[in-house]
Amino acid sequence: TEKFIEELKDKMNSYSKTLDYAGTSMLAVSLLTPTILFSAPSQDYWKIGLEYAQTIIFASMLKELFKLCVDRPRPYMYFNGVPTEKVKDGDWNDSFISGHSTLSFAAASFSSYLFCQYYPDSKWKFPVIFSSFGLATTTAILRLCSGNHFMTDVICGAIVGSSVGL
């Protein structure tokens, strides 16, 4: 098993506090992507806001359900220098699925879909799609690089989040 763990370490990262914070910052920016919808008619703001709140709440609930049902140690647990604060708060065994990826992809798909519904002929349609999904992808990559998640964690989070956002 030691040989297997050594081979596995080549495919994951040890913990990086800086990249962890960067990933959380990117999530915060990703969650703001629906602000592009302030260009929609003002009478729709409450409807859009309520729909977005439902999207984020449902995505959060699904993420928590996965984390309750699947015990999976985070990649940083396989390295020396495990962050003690993460172990103390019990977060070390909640790798699957990536909540940051789930929420950022939910925001990206929600924003992109609604923007395309409101402005199907807009020249800004593709820049909005690429930038919102670019932020979500960057969030997911940072979660990998920070040692918080495996590739399957962020891919599944992206699929769940995108599905909920749509």
Image (spheres, rainbow, N blue to C red):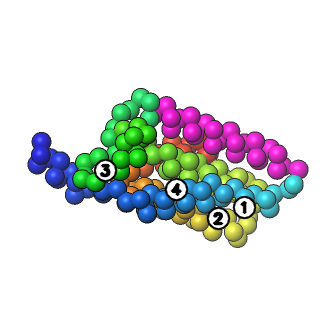
Q: Which residue is mark 4?
A: 24
Closer to the camera in the image, 20 or 80: 80
Three-letter amino acid code of the residue under disc 2: Val
- In the drawing, does residue 122 fall left or right of residue 154? right
Rounded to the nearest angstrom, the CA distance separating label 1 from label 4 is 21 Å
Under tag 1, what secondary structure? helix
Indicate the quadrant where residue 92 lies.
top left
Rounded to the nearest angstrom, the CA distance separating label 2 from label 1 is 8 Å
Label ID, residue 36: 1
Q: Residue at x 37, y 60 (%)?
A: 16
Residue contact at pointers 2 and 4, CB within 8 angstroms = no
- In the drawing, does residue 161 fall left or right of residue 34? left
Three-letter amino acid code of the residue under disc 3: Val
Q: Residues within 10 Å of mark 3 (few under 14, many from 20)?
A: some
Rounded to the nearest angstrom, the CA distance separating label 2 from label 4 is 21 Å
Q: Residues within 10 Å of mark 2 (few under 14, many from 20)?
A: some
Three-letter amino acid code of the residue under disc 4: Thr
Q: Which residue is mark 2?
A: 128
Q: Residue at x 69, y 55 (%)?
A: 34
- In the drawing, does residue 132 fall left or right of residue 118? left
Mark 4 or 3, closer to the camera: 3
Q: Earlier in the sequence, mark 3 or mark 2?
A: 3
Q: Residues within 10 Å of mark 4 (few under 14, many from 20)?
A: some
Q: Earlier in the sequence, mark 3 or mark 1?
A: 1
**Where's residue 33, x and y in %?**
66, 58
Q: Which residue is mark 3?
A: 82
Residue 52 belongs to the span the image colors magenta: yes
Give the residues in magenta: 43-66
Residue contact at pointers 2 and 1, CB within 8 angstroms = yes
